[in-house]
């Protein structure tokens, strides 16, 4: 099982869920380039200017680790990265679990993503306000000692710390992508996990994904918010287990 | 915990003893306690006052729902996860929405209270108003962003300047300007049009010069067409210089209805027309589209309807790009012109070299056409004026697939005299005809029938130049160069090259034609002067050979003669007039006639020489000559030989060869010398062969005469034949094989046993 973190933090988002599968799966966790303990020097604005670059990373990672029959569990934007990865190399994947997915955040005609363009602009601005605390002086501490994560962990808000420039770019490709047309290409068993009261990925959006991914399973969680993997790990784990056991 | 000095002041004491609940309610910061899912369970008065909300309304509301949209997303994606993972967050910037809808910028700290199992029970949040601090930070950010954008713009300018400096063609320059300008201002598409080169023949008409699209990026074909069709108005904008944004509105719909429709269909909202000028000359325009980006993966953050404008800074940036591109285009044009000039000079040099080595008119024409295509033109034709009208010794097309068409034209459709065909006109009028634009009407006028027209059309010619070939005022023919529609049309410089080339060709053709004419005359003359078949002489076998020099088209003054005289005698002669031209041939003919007339008296060989010498000045012969004169009695083999400066005759008998020791007197026509003509007398034995020859047989440019004579003796001795024909062949094969610098006349006589 390959767990991919979404917009915001890093692989520690899976700390309550991933261990539950270690008994019967090979569990692989990773940070997207630009986040967590990844090598910031590997960040190429061109490659990571679209979700396809991140999807290509996932495919590369599977091939490098010689993973087969992969259960890809993607949270938030990584659910769409999973869709694109499956599109790029369908032979690698056995199942896709989408936690709080949205193929398009911006409203478009009849489609309701839940956000206006102004909302997204405000969101990006909000990110900028919260990254003023990012100090260039701290970056070398994080980047220079990938072998000593405790150094990074000492920093405030460490799990969700990102270079502001990368954070802004990632926010743009997260909230300004439109992957609705890609959903039809998913031909592996797929689970859509939908939270309650999720302002980021409302239920209508989850239903939309379910309707457009052929043969997908839709599971409504009672967990609220956007991160059931943290707020309701047991329920999340059980839902994934139930899906895999089918 | 407190510390009080004494005596305690009453007021302070009262405050410090204050009710902790009151302290909570009126603390200088907002307190909000929520359940793990965010629902508010306790809130202090300060928070209510700041936000203008009622505590009763807040209970049960999720804290994240009190935030702006951006804040809400940040709460869900960052704040809530962090609280779960590390139990506390500090200094998070959020905007709380007040009861009246306005925003309260805050800084928020929060802790997660957990039970014994580590499960979250409560979130405690403190909220600090940070209006001025956030305002300051925003100003700082705005300044940072402005600086970054300004830096990005100067980076763009630097990049454009350095990339333009590396560009070597108009296409490259336009490519750089289009892609960089589009990228810099986030345009949905861009294209660069240039005014087509002005041509002298352009008829005065609409004031808009023809334009040409040199590069485009992101603009669909139908929109490009609509834009080109509206170029007239665009040109007006360019004349004003700078960059102009033309929004898709009532104004545009009135002036360019077609374009406005095409723009609207493509989701575009404005055009930006940027002048591309160099030193205030208008070269063209860089046009950008503002609106929906067709080839972007990301959704445009700007709402539709708000994309049709540019900031002042971006407009200035585009103006800079336009100016830089104009200067680069100017430089590239100069560069291209220089490169083309160099190529033309190199071509003329190659042509001169080639023509220096060419032999003959046809070969010259053929080699030249091969050289001209495709370096100078797509089609090169050389027509020459002949006695039977035009001939076309060369017609070559650069595309092998079209050579068949050219060949058919060459065979069946030569231009007729009296037609307005440009090559006929060029020859008749004696001046260059430059057809700048080949139209279908033009083709119809100059072709003679349907098939001719069809062939001419299939070549898809765009322009052509016909230059007359003239030597000393005499028209020789026409050189025609043509460019098809894939080649840049001919310029004045190309026409000049064609004229220089024609000049060279004229000289070579003139020389070659004269030469060929003279050669033809000389050979005819010589052939007529020499008896092709020697006469039958009883008792003798006679063989003669005449072999022309292999180099060049020279004609020699060599001759031989065999005349049976009345009675038993046979007169033989071999001679060589100095020089290799028509004069030499003429002198030889005259000399032979005089010699024959002398034979009437049957003079001995020495007397023949004496009489010729005596009458030489009266005969008016312009060249000196060497000769051997022989009388032979076939019955007895009696031989008498006299030499006027000629090489000794050869006697071959039974595998033995010797040169007869005939003492030569002075050459015919040489100044008088004391020694009179001597005569050698002897016998030609039965079966022996007497060989008379001219110096071409034994002389060569790189060997001594003695060596040649030794070789002759060896060849004759080794020939092993008594047949004069076979002997001649053997001698020629052994001695005059390969390259001959001079003509050879050979006469062999065998006395039959």
Image (tube, coloured by chain):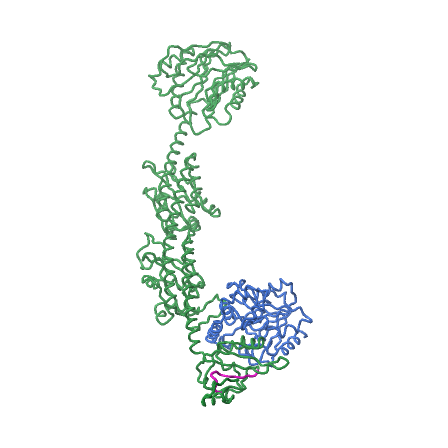
Residue closer to the observer: B603 or A197: A197
Residue closer to the observer: B178 or A11: A11
Q: Quadrant of residue A236?
A: bottom right
What range of the chain is rendered magenta?
B25-35
Give coordinates of residue A72: x percent, y percent: 62, 70
Say which residue appears at 52% left-offset and 63% top-offset. Answer: A44
Give coordinates of residue B229: x percent, y percent: 38, 63
> Is B33 a magenta residue?
yes
Q: Is residue A151 left or right of residue B676?
A: right
Is residue B197 something that shows in the picture?
yes
Q: Which chain is green?
A: B
User: Where does the C terminus of chain B fall, quadrant-wise?
Assistant: top right
Q: Which chain is blue?
A: A
Give coordinates of residue B587: x percent, y percent: 38, 21
Q: Quadrant of residue B245?
A: bottom left
In the rendered image, the vertical position of residue B162 relative to residue A20, given as above or below = above
């Amino acid at each position: 099982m390959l767990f991919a973190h979404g917009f915001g933090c890093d692989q520690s988002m899976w700390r309550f869920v991933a261990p539950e599968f270690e008994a019967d799966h090979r569990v692989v966790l990773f940070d997207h380039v630009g986040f967590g303990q990844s090598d910031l020097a590997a960040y190429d604005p061109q490659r990571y200017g679209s979700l396809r670059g991140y999807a290509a990373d996932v495919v590369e990672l599977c091939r490098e680790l010689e993973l087969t029959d992969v259960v890809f569990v993607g949270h938030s934007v990584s659910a769409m990265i999973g869709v694109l990865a499956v599109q790029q190399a369908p032979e690698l994947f056995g199942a896709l679990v989408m936690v709080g997915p949205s193929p398009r955040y911006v409203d478009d005609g009849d489609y309701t993503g839940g956000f206006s363009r102004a909302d997204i602009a405000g969101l990006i601005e909000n990110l900028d306000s919260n990254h003023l605390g990012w100090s260039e002086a701290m970056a070398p501490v994080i980047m220079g000692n990938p072998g000593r994560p405790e150094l990074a962990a000492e920093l405030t808000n460490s799990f969700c710390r990102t270079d502001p420039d990368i954070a802004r770019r990632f926010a743009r490709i997260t909230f300004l992508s439109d992957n609705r047309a890609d959903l039809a290409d998913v031909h592996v068993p797929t689970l859509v996990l939908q939270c309650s009261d999720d302002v980021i990925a409302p239920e209508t959006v989850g239903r939309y994904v379910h309707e457009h991914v052929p043969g997908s399973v839709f599971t409504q969680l009672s967990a609220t918010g956007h991160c059931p993997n943290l707020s309701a790990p047991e329920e999340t784990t059980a839902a994934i287990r139930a899906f895999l056991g089918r | 915990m407190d510390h009080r000095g004494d005596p305690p002041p009453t007021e302070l004491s009262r405050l410090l003893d204050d009710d902790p609940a009151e302290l909570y309610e009126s603390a200088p910061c907002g307190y909000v306690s929520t359940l793990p899912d965010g629902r508010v369970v306790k809130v202090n008065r300060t928070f209510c006052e700041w936000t203008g909300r009622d505590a009763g309304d807040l209970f049960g509301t999720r804290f994240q729902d009190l935030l702006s949209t951006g804040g809400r997303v940040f709460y869900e994606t960052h704040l809530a996860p962090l609280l779960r993972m590390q139990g506390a967050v500090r200094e998070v910037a959020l905007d709380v929405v007040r009861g009246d809808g306005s925003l309260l910028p805050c800084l928020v700290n929060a802790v997660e209270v957990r039970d014994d199992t580590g499960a979250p029970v409560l979130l405690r949040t403190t909220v600090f108003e940070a209006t001025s601090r956030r305002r300051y930070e925003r100003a700082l950010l705005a300044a940072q962003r402005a600086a970054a954008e300004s830096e990005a713009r100067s980076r763009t300018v630097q990049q454009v300047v350095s990339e333009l400096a590396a560009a070597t063609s108009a296409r490259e320059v336009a490519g750089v300007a289009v892609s960089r300008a589009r990228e810099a201002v986030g345009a949905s598409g861009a294209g660069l049009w240039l005014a087509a080169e002005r041509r002298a023949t352009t008829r005065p008409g609409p004031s808009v010069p023809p334009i040409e699209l040199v590069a485009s990026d992101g603009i669909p074909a139908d929109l490009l067409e609509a834009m080109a069709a509206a170029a007239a108005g665009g040109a007006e904008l360019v004349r004003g210089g700078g960059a102009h944004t033309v929004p898709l509105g009532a104004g545009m719909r009135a002036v360019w209805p077609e374009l406005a429709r095409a723009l609207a269909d493509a989701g575009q909202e404005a055009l930006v027309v940027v002048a591309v000028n160099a030193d205030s000359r208008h070269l063209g325009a860089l046009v950008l589209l503002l609106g929906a980006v067709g080839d972007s993966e990301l959704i445009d953050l700007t709402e539709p309807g708000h994309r049709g404008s540019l900031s002042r800074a971006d407009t200035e940036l585009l103006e800079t790009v336009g100016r830089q591109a104009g200067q680069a285009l100017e430089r590239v044009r100069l560069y291209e012109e220089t490169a083309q000039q160099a190529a033309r000079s190199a071509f003329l040099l190659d042509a001169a070299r080639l023509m220096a080595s060419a032999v003959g008119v046809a070969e010259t024409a053929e080699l030249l056409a091969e050289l001209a295509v495709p370096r100078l033109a797509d089609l090169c034709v050389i027509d020459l004026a002949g006695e039977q009208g035009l001939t076309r010794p060369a017609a070559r097309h650069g595309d092998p697939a079209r050579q068949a068409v050219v060949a058919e034209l060459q065979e069946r459709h030569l231009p007729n005299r009296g037609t307005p065909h440009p090559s006929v006109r060029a020859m008749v009028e004696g001046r260059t005809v430059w057809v700048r634009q080949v139209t279908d009407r033009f083709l119809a006028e100059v072709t003679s029938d349907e098939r001719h027209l069809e062939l001419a059309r299939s070549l898809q010619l765009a322009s052509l130049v016909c230059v007359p070939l003239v030597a000393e005022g005499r028209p020789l023919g026409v050189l025609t160069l043509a460019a098809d529609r894939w080649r840049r049309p001919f310029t004045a410089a190309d026409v000049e090259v064609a004229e220089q080339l024609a000049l060279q060709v004229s000289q070579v053709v003139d020389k070659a034609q004269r030469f060929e004419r003279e050669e033809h005359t000389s050979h005819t003359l010589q052939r007529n002067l020499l008896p092709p078949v020697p006469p039958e002489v009883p008792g003798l076998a006679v063989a003669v050979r005449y072999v022309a020099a292999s180099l060049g088209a020279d004609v020699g003054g060599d001759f031989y003669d065999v005349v049976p005289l009345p009675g038993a005698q046979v007169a033989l002669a071999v001679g060589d007039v100095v020089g290799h031209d028509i004069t030499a041939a003429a002198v030889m003919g005259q000399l032979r006639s005089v010699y024959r007339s002398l034979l009437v008296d049957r003079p001995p060989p020495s007397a023949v020489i004496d009489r010729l010498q005596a009458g030489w000045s009266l005969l008016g012969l312009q060249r000196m000559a060497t000769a051997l004169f022989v009388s032979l009695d076939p019955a007895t083999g009696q031989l008498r030989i006299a030499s006027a400066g000629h090489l000794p005759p050869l006697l071959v008998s039974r595998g033995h060869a010797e040169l007869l020791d005939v003492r030569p007197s002075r050459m015919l026509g040489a100044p008088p010398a004391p020694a009179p003509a001597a005569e050698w007398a002897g016998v030609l034995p039965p079966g022996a062969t007497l060989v008379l020859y001219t110096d071409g047989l034994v002389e060569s440019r790189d060997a001594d005469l003695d060596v040649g004579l030794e070789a002759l003796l060896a060849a004759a001795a080794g020939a092993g034949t008594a047949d004069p024909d076979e002997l001649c062949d053997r001698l020629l094969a052994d001695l005059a094989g390969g390259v001959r610098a001079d003509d050879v006349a050979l006469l062999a006589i065998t006395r039959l046993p």
